[in-house]
Amino acid sequence: MLTTADVARRFGVSTTTVRRWCELGLLPGAERVGVKQRATWVIPEGALQGFEPPKPGRPKKERQ
């Protein structure tokens, strides 16, 4: 199991970004452990296999 800091270092992003990925369900198997504000995320190494981080910024609107 990896911490948000481990995943952040691996992808060169902040821990806040990794927490957002977890909340959005982009890292399958990630679990929030702990109580309320002291909770943290643990991510299985297998969740990173084939994982493509989303591009930064807002998604572009489709033109019609």
Image (cartoon, helix red, strand yellow):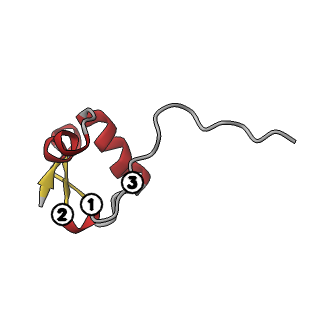
Mark 3, residues whose alpha carbon is within 10 Å: few (<14), some, or many (≥20)? few
Q: Which residue is mark 1?
A: 48
Q: Residue at x 76, y 42 (%)?
A: 62
Which corner quadrant holds the N terminus? bottom left
Cα separation between marks 3 and 1? 8 Å
Q: Nearer the viewer, mark 3 or mark 2?
A: 3
Q: Which residue is mark 3?
A: 52
Mark identifier at residue 45: 2
Mark 2 vs 1: CB contact within 8 A: yes
Q: Residue at x 19, y 45 (%)?
A: 10
Left or right: 13 as drawn, with respect to 6: right
- Picture layout, residue 62 above or below residue 41: above
Report which quarter residue 43 is drawn in: bottom left
Residue 18 in the image, given as x and y percentages of width and height: 29, 43
Foreground pick, 29 / 13: 13
Cα separation between marks 3 and 2? 14 Å
- Picture layout, residue 51 above or below residue 46: above
Mark 3 vs 2: CB contact within 8 A: no
Of the two numbered discs 3 and 2 on the same chain, state the one appearing first in sequence: 2
